Image (cartoon, rainbow, N blue to C red):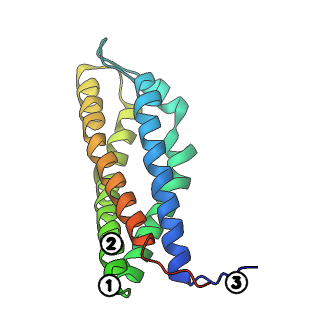
Amino acid sequence: MMNLKLSVAEVLLWLFVVNLGIAFGAGLYEHRIVLPRWLDTPGARWSSEAARADDVGRRFWGFVSTGPLTLLTLASLFFAAHATGPLRSWWLAAALVALVDRLLTFSYFIPTMVRLMQASDSASAVETAMRWARANHLRHALVAGAWFAALQALSWVRVPR
């Protein structure tokens, strides 16, 4: 039987990797499957009713990234700063990229979506929603970059045997 003892930092890194993977996959799903219900680009129509009905911010994102990923990012910054070697470099890179994502999420993505959920179907709402959707590509790239860097950091963790 294998004796497996992981430190708090290693468990945190595992949770960070798993949470980033879920956030990345869910973000792509939302963009490709859910967003078209809210924003009909060929018809240039915004449906705040559909966005409110889905309410993914409170029904999903709050439990996946708004709270947990933010806390894991902040904890990762602390633990990565105290790590050494390549583990430190990769983990710190992952945490810093995730921090940029978190800052953009709280300063732009969440407030904009809250406003869009209250907006009527107008040309300005469609324009704002299209800008939000385009900017979301940057968020996907940031989360993917953080996830890949965190996976690389995880490859430097030595599991006792």
Secondary structure at numbered mark 1:
helix
**Residue lying at 42% horizontally and 76% vertically, measured from the top left:** 156
The image shows residue 79 at horizontal and vertical percentages of 42, 82
Q: Label 3 sits on what residue type?
A: Asn
Front-most of residues 31 and 145: 145
Left or right, 72 with respect to 127, comes to right
The residue where tag 1 is placed is: 85
Q: Residue furthest top?
A: 43
Q: Quadrant of the C terminus?
A: bottom right
Q: Label 1 sits on what residue type?
A: Gly
Q: Label 2 sits on what residue type?
A: Trp
Front-most of residues 156 and 71: 156
Label 2 crowd bin: few (<14), some (14–19), many (20+), radius 10 Å: many
**Residue lying at 23% horizontally and 34% vertically, measured from the top left:** 131
Whichever of callouts 1 and 3 sits on the residue coming sooner in the sequence is 3
Label 3 crowd bin: few (<14), some (14–19), many (20+), radius 10 Å: few
Q: Nearer the viewer, mark 2 or mark 3?
A: 3
Secondary structure at numbered mark 2:
helix
**Residue lying at 29% horizontally and 69% vertically, measured from the top left:** 93
Whichever of callouts 2 and 3 sits on the residue coming sooner in the sequence is 3
Alpha-carbon distance for marks 1 and 3?
25 Å
The residue where tag 3 is placed is: 3
The image shows residue 71 at horizontal and vertical percentages of 47, 69
Alpha-carbon distance for marks 2 and 3?
27 Å
Q: Residue furthest right?
A: 1
The image shows residue 91 at horizontal and vertical percentages of 36, 73
Q: Quadrant of the N terminus?
A: bottom right
The residue where tag 2 is placed is: 90
Vertical order, 111 against 156 (above or below)? above
Whichever of callouts 2 and 1 sits on the residue coming sooner in the sequence is 1
Left or right, 120 with respect to 66, comes to left
